[in-house]
Amino acid sequence: MINNSGILKGLTVLDCSQILAGPFCSMILADMGARVIKIEKPNGGDDIRKWGPFKNGESVGFMNLNRNKESIVIDFKNPDGIEAMKTLVKKSDVILENYRTGTMEKLGLGYEDLKKLNKKIIYCSISGFGRTGPYAKRAGFDLVAQGMSGLMSITGHPNNPPAKVGVPVADLNTGMYALSAIEAAYINLLKNDKGQYIEVSLLESALAYTVWESTGYFYNEEIAEPLGSAHRVSAPYQAIRTKDGYLNIAAPNQSNWERLCDAIDRKDLLDNINFIDNTSRMKNIKNLETELEVTFMKKNRTQWIQILDKAGVPCGPINNIQEVWEDPQIKFRNMKVKTVHPKTGEVENIGFVAKFLENPSSIRTPSPLLGEHTEKVLSDFGFSKEDIKKLFLNKAIS
């Protein structure tokens, strides 16, 4: 086991969430050194354990999202299971959950109940639409949130069927908002000795991405449409076709635009009244695309990247996943990390985005087997061997 020197060492998190948003949040907390205890349901645990692809019967997605965590199985339908959970709460710092609205309260595990046991508890509740309002009791998923937040109406190319973002951005952004809120609440706890209730929803986390689209609507009631790879307020800032594929070019401000025209030997564009400034280029973006494509079709992608890099014009290839992991920058930055799982052997994981100099994140343990740490966790929290035996016998834990 790698020594834990993470910046959040000493923080204890009870993670009652499953699938993606909550586990993504707690994965980062665990990577940073927090002790994350994954509270799983009997008969299968986190649903994502059943999602492929699989290696030796283990979900590779689960293994990536749940590294550095401990697994304990508690049956919340069993009163003794509820009491065991409450005992854990007394000695923990954070609770993370994504049950349907009202479920935790019915179980006696809502914030108002648990803060009586631990006034310093940080309780983060994740839902589809928020815990209040007309949609509060609806089940929420990433796809639904992308559609209802407007993201799908602005994704893809004009006049095509609706398209979602290629990754589950509502789930992932919810996880990031939950992460930042938990960390802020923890700072507040250290400063003011007070706990906190936090709620984060998929719908609002997806809506938060519509910075340009929503502000445009607030200003002049403009209803945004999909633009493919183009930017909504600056140009050129999009994919341009070359001799052997597409290349992303980012020259939205005037200095980059001038460098671009000079690098591709198209200084005539600088004098063209249709492209004289960003406002003009946005009004004439289709003509701009045509003019640029005429030039970029003369060389291949690699040649243009070399030319533009030398000129200081931001640009880059559109990589597939294989090309990403073969990229020398990704390799140099150690964005692929490995751990050894007891059932699968070596497992490759996505590495750490936030890199701490003094207290680096690390993978100390692989993802847990279901209920692997039930006995150890309960023992650590003060349960006697006899207490643990009784809980096993009446199936409150497993």
Image (cartoon, rainbow, N blue to C red):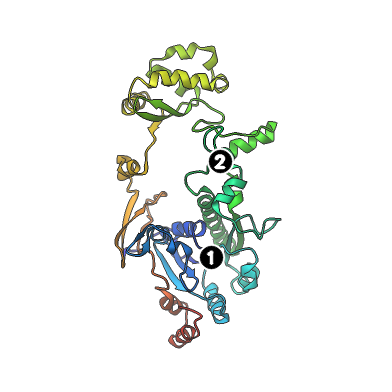
From the image, tell me which residue sits under label 1. 94
Nearest the camera: 19 or 382?
Answer: 19
Q: Please provide percent x and percent y for residue 280.
A: 56, 19
Q: Is residue 50 above or below residue 231?
A: below
Nearest the camera: 1 or 128?
Answer: 128
From the image, tell me which residue sits under label 2. 162
Distance from disc 2 to disc 1, alpha carbons, whole Å, reads 38 Å
Q: Is residue 255 above or below residue 356?
A: above
User: Mark 1 Cα within 10 Å, few/some/many (few <14, many 20+)?
Assistant: many
Q: Please provide percent x and percent y for residue 216.
A: 64, 33
Q: Earlier in the sequence, mark 2 or mark 1?
A: 1
Q: Quadrant of the C terminus?
A: bottom left
For this view, does 111 lie left or right of residue 32? Answer: right
Mark 1 element type:
strand
Q: Amino acid at mark 1?
A: Val
Q: Is residue 266 above or below residue 179?
A: above
Which residue is outermost to the bottom? 386
Q: Where is residue 52, by image quadrant?
A: bottom left
Mark 2 element type:
loop
Is residue 273 in view?
A: yes
Q: Quadrant of the N terminus?
A: bottom left
Discs 2/1, front = 2
Q: Please provide percent x and percent y for residue 7.
A: 43, 58
Is residue 177 in view?
A: no
Q: Please provide percent x and percent y for residue 91.
A: 52, 73
Q: Residue at x 56, y 33 (%)?
A: 159
Q: Amino acid at mark 2?
A: Pro
Q: Residue at x 58, y 51 (%)?
A: 144
Count of picture labels: 2
User: Mark 2 Cα within 10 Å, few/some/many (few <14, many 20+)?
Assistant: some
